[in-house]
Image: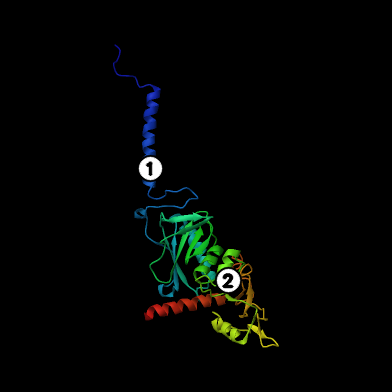
């Protein structure tokens, strides 16, 4: 007798199996969707409701932290970021400039944009005073903008160190691009650098010379003269002493393509001129520490 039940041939079985596999793939994708909705090099977007809490990357005695770094990036970068920030702390000398760092596995907002390799986000900030926001991007270029650090995920400790220098008040000591040098060296930037001062000439009158001495951020640490008096009563800027520990007034490359002259307190090349060499003058750490202490004292008195 012939059965009336339809025969499930190979084609039908194959389609039935494929349907089950498709359902499983879709279900898995739905589970992963809240976490990563981006390509490898795109700006990541994550669902904040699915994120774990903050993870310490670098800790000190709580009272010892002069500032905090709030790192916003993927959780799987925890170990790498911790190692790199520990490197920075060693160069920043924990006896002078101790800091703490916490990883916030956090999404980029939709109002993040990428322009010419740089990422910039609106409304990124930190609630705690004396904290610095560091956003870990994809393969973008590093920059510090409005006090917020944007660093590529492969940024070395040396590069993070340079960008932290910016966030803490240090300016570049290499020759800036012409358009940036024109604005920065012309005084059109609201940034009071701890390591750079500008003059319109290399030779100053007595009055202008005394004014320059008074406004040097490092005036309390000077160890050598910053100018030599000329026969006509003018002052020719520049320190003669060039030994490593001298603190004076030395030409910086910052304004090579801009108006006027830029001056720095030390003769050596520092991590703000070539981040690869990693040399962090103790003076720079003390200047940052002093500014942080002053800001904290002002906050406490208000």
Residue that numbered label 1 is attached to: 28
Residue 202 appears at what percent x and percent y? 65, 78
Residue extending furthest toward the right = 231
Quarter of the rendering containing residue 102: bottom left
Q: Residues within 10 Å of mark 2 (few under 14, many from 20)?
A: many
- Give how far across and how far down residue 241 sits, in percent: 67, 81
> Residue 183 at what x, y percent from top left?
55, 68
Q: Which residue is mark 2?
A: 185
Q: Secondary structure at mark 1?
A: helix
3D distance between C-alphas at marks 2 and 1 = 55 Å
Q: Which mark is residue 267?
A: none
Packing grade of label 1 (10 A; few <14, some 14-19, many >=20) is few
Tag 2's secondary structure?
helix
Q: Quadrant of the N terminus?
A: top left
Please state if 251 lies on the left or on the right of 67 as rendered: right
Q: Is residue 235 left or right of residue 78?
A: right
Quarter-of-image position of residue 251: bottom right
Q: Is residue 19 visible?
A: yes
């Amino acid at each position: 007798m012939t059965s009336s039940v339809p025969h499930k041939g190979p084609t039908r079985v194959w389609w039935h199996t494929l349907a089950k596999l498709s359902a499983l793939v879709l279900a898995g994708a739905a589970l992963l969707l809240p976490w990563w909705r981006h390509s490898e090099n795109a700006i990541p977007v994550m669902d904040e409701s699915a994120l774990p809490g903050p993870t310490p990357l670098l800790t000190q005695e709580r009272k010892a932290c002069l500032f905090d770094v709030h790192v916003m990036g993927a959780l799987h970068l925890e170990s790498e970021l911790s190692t790199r920030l520990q490197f920075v702390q060693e160069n920043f000398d924990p006896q002078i400039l101790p800091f703490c760092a916490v990883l916030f596995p956090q999404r980029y907002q939709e109002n993040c944009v990428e322009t010419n390799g740089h990422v910039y986000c609106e409304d990124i900030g930190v609630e705690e005073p004396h904290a610095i926001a560091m956003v870990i991007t994809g393969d973008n270029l590093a920059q510090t903008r409005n006090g917020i650090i944007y660093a590529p995920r492969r940024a070395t400790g040396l590069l993070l160190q340079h960008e932290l220098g910016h966030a803490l008040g240090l300016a570049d000591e290499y020759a800036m691009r012409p358009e940036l040098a024109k604005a920065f060296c012309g005084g059109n930037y609201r940034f009071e650098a701890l390591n750079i001062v500008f003059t319109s000439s290399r030779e100053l009158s007595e009055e202008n010379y005394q004014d320059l001495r008074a406004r040097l951020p490092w005036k309390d640490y000077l160890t050598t003269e910053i100018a030599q008096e000329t026969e006509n009563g003018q002052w020719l800027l520049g320190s003669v002493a060039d030994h490593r520990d001298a603190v004076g007034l030395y030409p910086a490359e910052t304004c090579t393509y801009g108006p006027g002259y830029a001056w720095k307190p030390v003769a050596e090349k520092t991590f703000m001129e070539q981040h690869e060499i990693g040399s962090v003058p103790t003076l720079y750490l003390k200047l940052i520490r002093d500014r942080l202490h002053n800001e904290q004292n002002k906050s406490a008195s208000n």
